Each structure stands twice: as structure tokens, then as C-alpha cells.
Image (cartoon, helix red, strand yellow):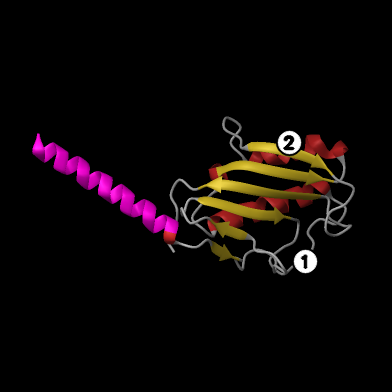
Amino acid sequence: MSARIGIIACVALAAMTELVRAQDQAPRYLNPPSLPPATGYTHVVVAPDGRTVYVAGQIALDSTGRLVGAGDFRAQAEQVYANLRRALASVGGSLSDLVKTTTFITDVAQVAVLREVRGRYLDAQHPPANSLIPVATLARADLLIEIEAVAILRNPARP
């Protein structure tokens, strides 16, 4: 019986040590080079637990900051999902790690196109929670869609 108590105590101590270590860490702020240059914000923030990831609103800009798909909702949506994929890959994650997205669109007539594009990127059986918010405009008048996200990494990359 005492050996069993000893093992339980060791496991509990290891878990507590990991919890304290996670609480002592600061968030990690990342601007992956595969995403557009960030001005005044951070693309990816990893919480101290090393698993929770916050992704800033991704828009239809490539890694050089050039607009992809001017006037073309489908092309912009494709670029946004590609940027989300790159953001998560930068911390060892994938789109399947998404648990919440917020999607901003400037034209609700594009919802069917959004659903089609989203269906090619996300798991239809386990899609993340999502809020769809129509807006009059985004940060730039030529942007048609923006998606921000929260993920919980299954296999977090260690810093």
C-alpha cells in the first residue's frame, strides 16, 4: 500500500510542478514570416499553458502584404484559410485544432461561398464554434472577409 501511495504522490508532485511551470511562463508572441507583416498587433499568441493559441484576424494578404483576390470573395476566403493554416503551423498546430472562430464578412450574399470554402478546410464532423458577423467594412475597403481564431493544440510545439 505504501508503494502505491508513493507513486500517487510522485504523479501528483509532477502534475503540480508542470502547473507551476506553466503559470510562471509568459505568453509567446509570434509573427511568422509566412504571414503578412504585422503592424501594431501580433498574429499568434500562445498562452502560458502552451496549448491555447489566439490567432489575430487573418485577411487576404500574402506574406509580402499584397492583397490576394481583389473583388473576389472566393479567392480572399481561400487566402484567409491558408493564412489560418500557416498561423497554426507556426506553433505545431493545424486547422483541426481550432475550437472557435469569428468570421467577419462584408456581404452576406457570400455565405454559400464561405460555407463551400470552409468545408474544404475544416472537419465537417467537428467544426469549431463560430460567430458570423456582417460588417460594413474591414480594416481596408478592398477586404471582403476576416477570420480570427482560438485553438487548443493537441501536440504543442515546445519553445
In depth, the one of 16 and 120 nearer the eye is: 16
Instruction: Please indicate whether residue 18 sits to the left or right of residue 102 in the image.
Output: left
Q: Residue 99's spot in the image, x, y percent?
A: 58, 40
Residue depicted at x 75% and y 56%: 59
Q: Secondary structure at mark 2?
A: helix
**Residue 83 belongs to magenta span:** no
> Crowding near pointer 2: few (<14 within 10 Å), some, many (20+)?
few
Instruction: Please indicate whether residue 132 sits to the left or right of residue 54 in the image.
Output: right
> Which mark identifies residue 66?
1
Task: Answer above or below: position of 101 versus 156.
Answer: above
Q: Is residue 121 in view from this perspective?
A: no
> Which mark identifies residue 93?
none
Q: Quadrant of the N terminus?
A: top left
Q: Amino acid at mark 2?
A: Arg
Q: Amino acid at mark 1?
A: Arg
First to last magenta residue range: 1-23
Task: Answer above or below: position of 67 versus 147.
Answer: below
**Residue 9 belongs to magenta span:** yes
> Which mark identifies residue 115?
2
> Crowding near pointer 1: few (<14 within 10 Å), some, many (20+)?
few
